[in-house]
Amino acid sequence: MQITFPDGSVREYENGTNGLDIAASLSQGLRKSVICCEIDGVRTDAFAPINRDCSLKFLTFEDEDGRWTYRHTASHILAQAVKRLWPEVKLAIGPAIKDGFYYDFDAPFTFSTEDFKKIEKTMDQICRENLRLERFELPREEAIRFMEEKGEPYKVELIRDLPEDEVISFYRQGEFVDLCAGTHVASTARVKNLKLLSVAGAYWRGSEKNKMLQRIYGTAFEKKEDLQAYLTKLEEAKKRDHRKLGKELHLFMTDELVGKGMPMFLPKGYTLWRILENYIRDKEIKSGYQHVLTPCIGTVDLYKISGHWDHYQQNMFPAMNVEDETYVLRPMNCPHHMRIYANSPHSYRNLPVRIGEIAHDFRYEASGTLKGIERGRHFCQNDAHLFVTPEQIKDEFAKVVDLIFTTYKDFGITDYRCVLSLRDPADKVKYHDDDEMWNTAESALRDVLNSLGLEYTEEIGEAAFYGPKLDVNVTPAVGAEYTLSTCQLDFCLPARFNLTYIDKDGKERTPVVLHRAILGSLDRFMAYLIEETMGAFPTWLAPEQVRILPITDRTVEYSNRLAAKLEEHDIRVEVDARNEKIGFKIREAQMQKTPYMLVIGDKEAEENTVAVRSRKEGDLGAMPLDAFLDKISEEIRTKAK
């Protein structure tokens, strides 16, 4: 057989030669680094015999598919170790994921991190045993009997649900066999540097109607130093986790009785919220936006017209029947804004119409995806819809882009990338089915981005159901990137709502709509700020900008007068008049990450001064109050970082 390599070279090998042996014929170093192969573009076990002419690419840990295969085998090693230790445990699924793997177990006891040492020790033993992995296939009924005899009901269910023509494959390593499509490394000895990370609940097949299983997460790296670097990164992530900091800084809370994914903002958190809300609303009003207030619910008929009911219903809460109408909590605000536009006649002379709202929305998110205020079932969007003529698309889009980037400058956001999100033409369920509309919208948006000179990448299948969009993805201090801002081009919804304006020739035309969100949701934006700053917000954003610390009861009255003077200048200030030692008060203010502390003793009270301690600069010594006011006011005015 003839094997074609990525560089175009061709070599001849005996039928049945596997990828590892072919790699060895080229270099023993290559043989050692190969994890799996790609044959004619399909990922394949490197130990599988090859029996035909094909193109062959070797995949190592440097390749995404190589890392996936390496960690997929690690998940099998985890399952084998658990079964050795506790044979009564039932197996569910165990895929590789980004940066690691997990396996779901049905156990009659609760796993704890204390069990991890035993499991890891057994996993290391399995790796040292150098067990060869072997793939085999079984007919459907035989496969079902095989797993029934092993007492694995979850595997039996998976097999029964496979399509009739599906190849049913298994992998064996020593005494352990698992239902699996592959791919895997050749031997357990190939997997090193394993580490279990956490355990969490997970519903079988992701449905809350099913049994709650236990999911053990882990990771694996080829090199020990890479594992250590990753663990260090995880520790940093824990320190920055907005859920942890939100609790410590008294910003927000959650309550099971209120409901999962329904965070509640405490006074300090709501202060930060209001700062963000006022900042973006004022900025938009100065840019010609008209802000409105609309209800958090709408009729199902409203969402049938918009298309959300057909394309987005799985993300919406169940409908509510009230008298002779059926309502639903809104997941988005565009239908309401469409109706506001339709409330008045429009001419080309008064377009663009820019309707903005700080709007409360509700989406059903699976409990396993919820993450503090970053992803909840209730959130608040910085939303707006711009109704424009086709000739105005470029200028209005450019203004939105400028608004995004001037906002990022104020918040010190520099690590981001632009993505042109397009539809998947083959997906007729997710996307509005109108090829002509999509081709027009995608071409128009691409032309606008090119004319603006923006660098961007294109991603298929990431568009909104009604149109393509520009997503601005940020890279947080820790973790994967996510979308913060977006601007979507929509030819669909204005037509569905029969929106019109009178054009220059006196004829009715349909406007184009730009859907855009600058801060995205205020909740997610706040989570981003918390993790970026570790709660040490710049002074202009800090919920508490100054804390006054009287050393004795004698200076409390002077401290209160200082606070009143600062409040006259819109400085957010608190007086800590508790009967505690000054060192304790200072440490507590530092823990709360207050930008400035004013320590007030008898001398300061007598001389009408303040002793200033800065979170960033340390002890600044005594100064007149006016001098401190000038300093902090300038810091706030310039939005100093």
Image (tube, grey):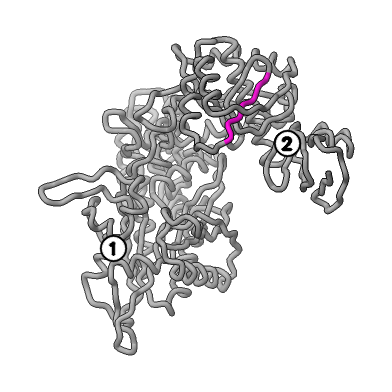
* Secondary element at image label 2: strand
Mark 1 or mark 2, whichever is nearer to me:
2
Q: Is residue 421 above or below residue 290?
A: above
Q: Is residue 455 magenta?
A: no
* Crowd class of label 1 (few under 14; some 14 to 19; many from 20; radius 10 Å): many
The magenta region covers: 167-173
* Secondary element at image label 1: helix
The quadrant the N terminus occupies is top right
* Residue 162 x/y as whole percent: 50, 34
Tag of residue 640? none
Write down the residue under mark 2.
36
Q: Residue at x 64, y 30 (%)?
A: 71
C-alpha separation, residue under disc 1 versus residue under disc 2: 52 Å
Tag of residue 337? 1
Kind of residue at disc 1: His
Q: Foreground residue, 110 or 398?
A: 110
Asked whether residue 603 is in view, the answer is no
* Crowd class of label 2 (few under 14; some 14 to 19; many from 20; radius 10 Å): many
In primary-sequence order, the first of circles 1 and 2 is 2
Q: Foreground residue, 390 or 182?
A: 182
Kind of residue at disc 2: Cys
Does residue 320 appear left or right of residue 549 in this picture? Answer: left
Does residue 562 appear left or right of residue 423 in this picture? Answer: left
Residue 335 image-quadrant placement? bottom left
